[in-house]
Image (cartoon, rainbow, N blue to C red):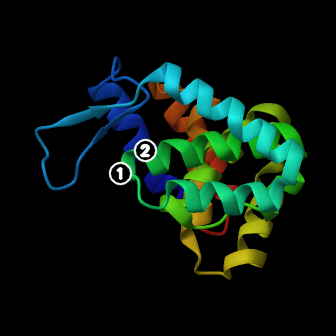
Amino acid sequence: ICILVVVVGWLSYVQFPDAPIFAFIHPQKKSKTMKVDVSSVLAQKKELVELIEDEGPQQAYEVFLESYRASHFGIQHTMAHIMGELLFETQGLEGLKICDSSFAFGCYHSFFGRAVAEHGISILPRLDRACIEKFGPLGSGCQHGIGHGVIEYFGHDEAGLIGALDACKDTTQA
């Protein structure tokens, strides 16, 4: 799974290097692209930080899930990325216990990206063990998030791809 994410992420970047971060293709209408208003996202990010501070991370995550449950998938997944980043910023590696499979594991994607950026690839076995403890040996969606962190760490060029693929060997879902 880690290798699959690395390869697909790399190919996507090579094919669309200037694609905006917050652009998602609606699954039923492949020709339409939905863009998220960045100023709105920044305001929502600020609200989530305040919620984490006021209610604690677990309660904030539950409120977050309920708040975005009826939103378009692209919005859900983008905001889950942001929530994962905020959980890492505020909780460190302990925030990993709060992320879950909601919104296509988006929380893990940015959480792992930040964890790998801060701790380096030596953190991969620890992240992999945490995934297995939470989802079992076949819970590949969590390790999928590790793949996102690894490709961001190494970069989207050919050398980055090789480094990322090699690093995936440190996970059980290589």
Residue at the image position 29 percent from the left and 25 percent from the top:
16
Q: Is residue 166 left or right of residue 96?
A: left
Question: Three-letter amino acid code at disc 2?
Answer: Ile
Image position of 97 with respect to 159: above or below = below
The residue carrying mark 1 is: 72
Residue 28 versus residue 155: which sits nearer the camera? 28
Residue at the image position 62 percent from the left and 39 percent from the top:
82
Residue 154 versus residue 75: which sits nearer the camera? 75
Quadrant for residue 45, please give it.
top right
Q: Is residue 115 visible?
A: no
**Element at badge 2?**
helix
**Element at badge 1?**
loop
Q: Position of residue 48 (x, y in %)?
A: 71, 40
Quadrant containing the C terminus in the rendered view = bottom right
**Tag 2 near tag 1, CB within 8 Å:** yes
**Number of the label disc, if any, that sits on residue 154:** none
Residue at the image position 42 percent from the left and 24 percent from the top:
37
Crowd rating for badge 1 (residues with CA inside 10 Å; few <14, some 14–19, many 20+): few
The residue carrying mark 2 is: 75
